[in-house]
Image (spheres, rainbow, N blue to C red):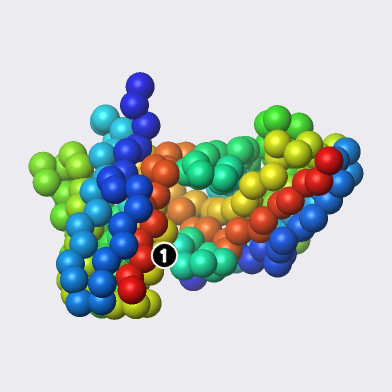
């Protein structure tokens, strides 16, 4: 069974440019999460999809970030325009349900560097 | 709200030393507790978990006990190996309408031969 896949693995862009990150969750997982980790700090929650609907986007830092999940399958996270402070590792995770002890499965992350 | 506090790293040990990484939490509701590990160049993967008080999660020689009275879930291993060098994240999850795993800041472990 394929795991959570993220593209690209690395991205270096200039301030002001646009970047789109993609996440393919494990097939059949309704829950999809985006997280970000800035160097040395905690993995911070950005948003949560249940199927194609945004369940919680309270962690999105500002309106330069736009997430979508087409048809409840893969998801994209667009940053436009990118700022220096957006640099970090963006993780995607998916899970089957919200039951007790549910494990979230993570992708390898996309390392974004804004210069 | 929910939060996880981990000890600051890096933790540097010699091979075969005893490891403890402290983790405490605050949560609304009754959380499940997890330890995730990130090896160099890889994504996070679940190391172990515990879903109720006094449960002990264990895997690959690591273990952690869910202590509700002290709101803690400390990770321990009796004898670390060089291959255990990684970043370890403590996390909690509260089931319900919006299950959102909450993570600590991670603790880097470096094991020397």
**Residue at the extreme top:** A1
Q: How many labels does the image show?
A: 1
Question: Mark 1: which secondary structure?
Answer: strand
Q: Quadrant of residue A80?
A: bottom left
Where is residue A29 drawn, in percent x and y? Answer: 29, 36
- The residue that label 1 is drawn on is A88
| Residue A106 visible to an observer of this rendering | yes
Where is residue A72 drawn, in percent x and y? Answer: 16, 42
**Residue at the extreme left:** A71
Q: Which of A95 and A40 is in front in this view?
A: A40
Residue appearing at x 33%, y 74% in the figure: A115
Q: In which quarter of the image is residue B11?
A: bottom right
Name the subunit of mark 1.
A
Residue appearing at x 18%, y 39% in the figure: A73
Q: Which of B13 and A26 is in front in this view?
A: B13
Q: Quadrant of residue A98?
A: top left
| Residue A35 visible to an observer of this rendering | no
Task: Tell me if B66 is positioned left or right of B93 in this view.
Answer: right
Q: Which of A92 and B58 is in front in this view?
A: A92
Whether A15 is drawn above or below B90: the answer is: below
Where is residue B106 drawn, in percent x and y? Answer: 61, 59
Where is residue A44 drawn, in percent x and y? Answer: 44, 64
Task: Tell me if A18 is positioned left or right of A34 in this view.
Answer: left
Whether B109 is drawn above or below A100: the answer is: below
Q: Nearer the viewer, residue A85 or A50?
A: A85
Residue appearing at x 51%, y 44% in the figure: B41
Task: Tell me if B49 is positioned left or right of B95 in this view.
Answer: right
């Amino acid at each position: 069974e394929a795991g959570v896949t993220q593209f690209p693995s690395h991205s270096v862009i200039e301030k002001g440019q646009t970047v789109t990150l993609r996440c393919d969750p494990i097939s059949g997982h309704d829950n999809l999460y985006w997280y970000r980790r800035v160097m040395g700090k905690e993995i911070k929650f950005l948003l949560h999809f249940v199927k194609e609907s945004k369940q919680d986007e309270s962690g999105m830092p500002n309106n330069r970030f736009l997430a979508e999940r087409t048809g409840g399958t893969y998801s994209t996270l667009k940053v436009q325009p990118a700022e220096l402070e957006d640099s970090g590792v963006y993780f995607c995770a998916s899970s089957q349900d919200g039951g007790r002890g549910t494990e979230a499965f993570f992708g390898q992350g996309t390392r974004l560097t804004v210069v | 709200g929910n939060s996880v506090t981990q000890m600051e790293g890096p933790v540097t040990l010699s091979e075969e030393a005893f490891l403890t990484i402290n983790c405490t939490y605050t949560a609304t509701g009754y959380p499940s507790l997890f330890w995730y590990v990130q090896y160099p160049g890889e994504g996070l993967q679940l190391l172990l978990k515990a879903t109720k008080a006094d449960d002990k999660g264990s895997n690959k020689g690591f273990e952690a006990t869910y202590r509700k009275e002290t709101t803690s879930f400390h990770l321990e291993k009796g004898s670390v190996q060089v291959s255990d060098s990684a970043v370890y994240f403590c996390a909690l999850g509260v089931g319900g309408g919006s299950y959102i795993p909450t993570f600590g800041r991670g603790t880097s472990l470096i094991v020397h031969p």
